[in-house]
Image (cartoon, rainbow, N blue to C red):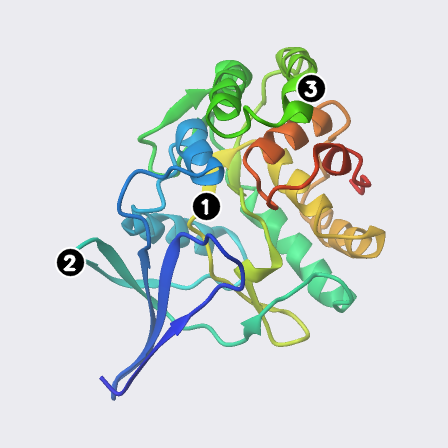
Amino acid sequence: MLHIEELHPGYEDHASNVWLVKTKDEEVIVRSSKLEEEPNNDFWWGCNQLLGIDPRSVHNLEMVNHTLRHYTTLPIPKVLRKYVLDREYIVVEKLEGKMLQSFFNQPDSLLHNFGKGLAEIHQYKTNYVGNPSRTHQIPLHSFHQHVIQTSTELIERFHSHNQKIRNRFKKFISQTASLPSPEEASFVLIDMDPTQFLTDGQKITGLVDTEAYAIAPREFDFIGLEYLFTETEATAFRKGYETISPLPSLTQCREPYRYLYRLLSVQGSVDLDEWMKHPSFF
């Protein structure tokens, strides 16, 4: 061992320990989960109940990354080795680039390339919602009922004190219950954020944080992205995406899915009114 350095993802409450490890033979990234107990915050508890995602199971990333690599031109790190010591560890290849801090003011080419790469991932299609390892599978026709049940528990556990969230819950139930069942599901990144990506300043050089990848309607990715873009970024992204596939319609699902994302605190404890009124770009 020549050098070991702990890497920080740039935001608090992250679930992973990540190290850069250099030996005389290689330079690699080692990942494990910080969590020892079952997840108990709104995001990870919700992801676990809704989609069967457990951040402690980092060995599952071998299959996730392998499948993503097969579908997309976005660089995805290869899982090189797996270990179990006090918990699960994986060794993955180190990709070049710096963590992307924001999608704002990035070159159109980067956003176009990102849109195309995400559309390629969405070419993977399944007939269930759940986790990539298929240990948790919800039939498409009962997904929205499952969303309502999980959301009820999320509010009781984590948002019982939040009057705005409670007051809107009935509307959310009626909106969600009236949504058509998804026709298919794909890989979606529930905690979509620029910090999951590496860049060389011109293009994305890595999608490196894949632990919250789930199988769900692709609309989820667009719900998350609207909070990370302005019209400028969304336009360049859309053009790239549409080279592979048309965009889904968010008109009917935007409000209920946004509410669900707020229950999961995908971007933290944002005021509900502010969250729901955020501009729409897709």
Q: Sequence order check: which comes first, mark 1 or mark 2?
A: 2
Is label 1 in a helix, a strand or a loop? Answer: loop
Relative to 34, does residue 99 appear above or below in the rendering?
below
Q: Residue at x 64, y 34 (%)?
A: 219
Residue reaching furthest to the front: 161
The numbered disc on residue 212 is 1
6 and 68: which is toward the camera = 6
146 to the left or right of 168: left
Mark-to-mark CA distance, 1 and 2: 22 Å
Tag 1: amino acid: Ala
Q: CA distance from mark 3 to mark 1?
A: 27 Å
Label 3 or label 2, whichever comes before in sequence order: 2
Above or below: residue 78 compared with residue 119? below
Image x and y of residue 187, in percent: 50, 41
Q: Nearer the viewer, residue 216 or 56?
A: 56
Q: Position of residue 183 (x, y in %)?
A: 58, 22
Which residue has dot 3 on it?
Answer: 168
Q: Position of residue 55 (x, y in %)?
A: 36, 46
- Residue pictured at 52% horizontal, 36% vertical: 186
Q: Is residue 73 visible?
A: no
Q: Are marks 3 and 2 in contact (CB under 8 Å)?
A: no
Q: Which mark is residue 85?
A: 2
Q: Amino acid at mark 3?
A: Arg
Q: Secondary structure at mark 2?
A: loop
Can residue 249 be seen? yes
